[in-house]
Amino acid sequence: MTTPPASTTADLPHYWQGAFIGDEEAGRRLAHLADTALAALATPLDTAAVLSACDALATALRDPAHPTRLRLAARLPAGEDEGVLAELGPALTRAELTRKLRRELGGTAPQRLSRPDAKETVYEAWAPVGLVAHIAPGNAATVAPLSVVEGLLAGNVNVLKTSSGDPLFAQHILAELAALDPTGAISERVIVLRFSSSRQEWLRMMCAPADAVAVWGGEAAVAGVAEHVPPGCRLVEWGHKISFAYLARAAWHDEQVLAALAADVCAYEQQACSSPQVVYLDTEDEEELFAFAERFAGVLAAAPAPTAAEAPDIAEDAEVTTTELIARLEEHLGLTRVHAAADGSWRVIADTRPALTASPLHRSIWVKPLPRKRALAVLRPMRRYLQTAGVAGGRTDVAELSHLVLAAGATRVTPLGAMPSGYSGEPHDGVYALQRYSRRVAVQADERFATVACLDDLVRPVSPPAQRGPLRDKAAVQELNDQVSRADAELYFRSGGSTGTPALSLFTYEDYDAQMHAAARGLLAAGYDPRRDRTANLFYCGGMYGGFISFFSILERLGGVQIPLAAGPDHLATARALVECEVDTLFGMPSYLWQLLHDQSDLLRSYGGIRRIFYGGEHFTAEQRRVLVEDFGIETVRSLTYGSTDLGPLGYQCTESAGGVHHLHADLHTLEILDVDEDRPVPHGDTGRLVFATRARRGQDLGRYVIGDLGRAVPGPCPCGNRAPRFELLGRLGEVMRVATHFLNYRRFVTLAEELLDHRGGTQIVLAHDGLRERLTVRLERAGGEPRAIRAREVFLAGYPELRTAVAEGLLELAVTEVDRAGLERAPGTGKLRSVVDTRQQPTTAPD
């Protein structure tokens, strides 16, 4: 439950950066608006904070009993609250605003300076214009808050003017929004003033320091504001527009078309800019015109009558009556023919003159002839005022007429029956609002920045939001799949199954695209060069496994040269392809790449062209890295990415990272490191469970995900200059085995084999129970030469005291065997080596 803003006890008319104030104080502060904006703009606004607050407000608005909704409903006129809040609730959801950001500004972090072309050290971003002044209309309660939200999404400071008769709804809903932002950044960027447009001095002070002024209204309203807009300030006009219907001959007698047209005329009593005011027929024949008008009048007469609240006021009624009377007089000249309801609730006026004529609204519709050969000439003079064209006809008619009306100046074409409605992310009046409130900026850099994917990473880390909610393991995350809507389940992956049963992961294409772009940025940081590297994608493919597909997508986004071979059993064919395609960079899993290089060592060594290896899914040991460098001449051996099938890319290495050290993909995730036994944070630098939470994902929220890996935070700044947090991977929870009352770590066995046995191949542990005691078998990949099993057993016992104690007490039997590569169990989907194979009936691992 949210708490109301602290200053809402009095009905003061103005909201200024978190407080409600009166006229005198508002006037004093308004004189220093430029300084206020300057102070607020000193710190960039995190778009994630805006999305989070808006989503929380949307949740409250959709709950009829929520205190926030009840407070806001009390600020609206009786009878209007349900409609206004029902419109705002869906519009403020994270999903809706995320879609808007991606469509209009290309992503959910548009202000971050990133490389649009990975082959160039050029950085571009959408920067806020600065201070946006919003002049809201007095007859649309949703416009004011939504306009300010658009300004916030673009990162601006926003000052909003509402009309003097406003019921303070905009002030209070924006105060509620600011109260839902724990960072306080939103309140610093929101000012709402209520005053009459006749108060010219306030209007001048509001517009004078603005970088953009958005004004809603007709020509007179725009002109009244424009005289206060300083030179160089962007004037964003959201003025009144005229819309029309255009019917090809094939649609004239279609009853469904006429019913849809009548629905568009009746919706909102034509008050929307997208409501039809004129119906054009593709004809020059007056008799066809009059006949259609009569048929349509019958359809309009059958429509539900308007409610009392929708009836025109005195001025509107006078305009409707005057228009109808003049048209009736012109009937005597043969120019018009009028059909009207006896009670005056609707009227259809057939007019033989094609010129676009504004309707007095309230179900008043003109019907005019306009052959398509004359459409451009007749409509284009009114291009500044055109908005929606509802087109009906055959498919060819719709295609041809759409081109015509768009060329004439219309900005929208819809089917009849859909003119007042829109679709998610639709541009308004031919432009994207967020682009109007933003500037496209660029920074050109030199070769020193070749591994810097985002310039912001050198300046400030992404601020992680506080994490709340329960911890979830893999089983709990799998249960969430049942809650994913069909619309959000667009891409299916299965995990490799190296640590258990393969699990299903679902993604929207938007989420997948955002993750692949993030992984691509991480690969640049690791030193990948898309201008020069010729890369073989050697990850496993098929069976819904995402490895090969994901890295194909990453290389595609980088524009790098890719040879998509995939991992396969024919190592000779793969090696020949590497040579023929002049590959110098390998992407793949360590176990597969190790096998390939050793099986085809003669061919690949003689080729000598493999310079770089980027790996994922597993790890190379230090000894294996040494062999790759010294024996095969590999210059770079670096992690391609650290991630999971469920969450996507989690971390990336830079050119200064070694071993398991990674930078966090902080624009995608937050990271907590919790104690192994208790759900509490460990001291900075201590080892604990890695818990990730995704910051921006449309399809599903996985919450605080205990991924199953151990790690620690790496203190201090990274030598590469990147400010993103660093962490070091220290194995998996499943690699810590509860055996014979002791906790044994798989990594300890690997280290002993590597350092004391010069072991370079795979190591696998098999746990079993023979009914009397437990058995631990270490499988070592055979490397040729003298057998090492006996010596290896001695090394493990001597170097691992806990293991030695368990064996000495008779609780555990230790065996060491040497096997060929085929003797090591691997996950069938990915080829990953299974580090621990537990065949006991009830396997026990360290606490999760």
Image (cartoon, rainbow, N blue to C red):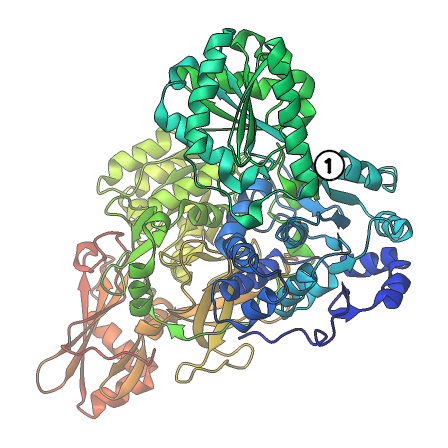
Identify whether 41 is placed above or below 397: below
* Image position, residue 190 (x, y; %): 73, 60
Task: Answer left or right for 501 relative to 380.
Answer: left
* Image position, residue 79 (x, y; %): 55, 58
Instruction: Please tell me which residue is depicted at 62% across the width and 34% down the height of the picture.
Output: 429
Residue 225: name its quadrant: top right
Q: Residue furthest left?
A: 771
Between 326 and 242, the one lying in front of the other is: 326
Identify whether 147 is placed above or below 467: above
Instruction: Please tell me which residue is depicted at 61% across the width and 20% down the height of the picture.
Output: 328
Q: Quadrant of the C terminus?
A: bottom left
Between 10 and 582, the one lying in front of the other is: 10
Residue 272: name its quadrant: top right
Could you tell me if residue 559 is visible in this image?
Answer: no
Q: Say few, some or many: other residues with alpha carbon within 10 Å of mark 1 (under 14 / 14 to 19 / 20 or more).
A: some
Q: Secondary structure at mark 1?
A: loop
Amino acid carrying mark 1 in the image: Gly
Identify whether 136 is placed above or below 728: above
Task: Answer left or right for 367 relative to 189.
Answer: left
Could you tell me if residue 215 is visible in this image?
Answer: yes
Between 113 and 71, the one lying in front of the other is: 71
Q: Residue furthest bottom?
A: 809
Between 250 and 235, the one lying in front of the other is: 250
Residue 44: name its quadrant: bottom right
State the residue position of label 1.
218
* Image position, residue 34 (x, y; %): 86, 55
The image shows a total of numbered marks equal to: 1
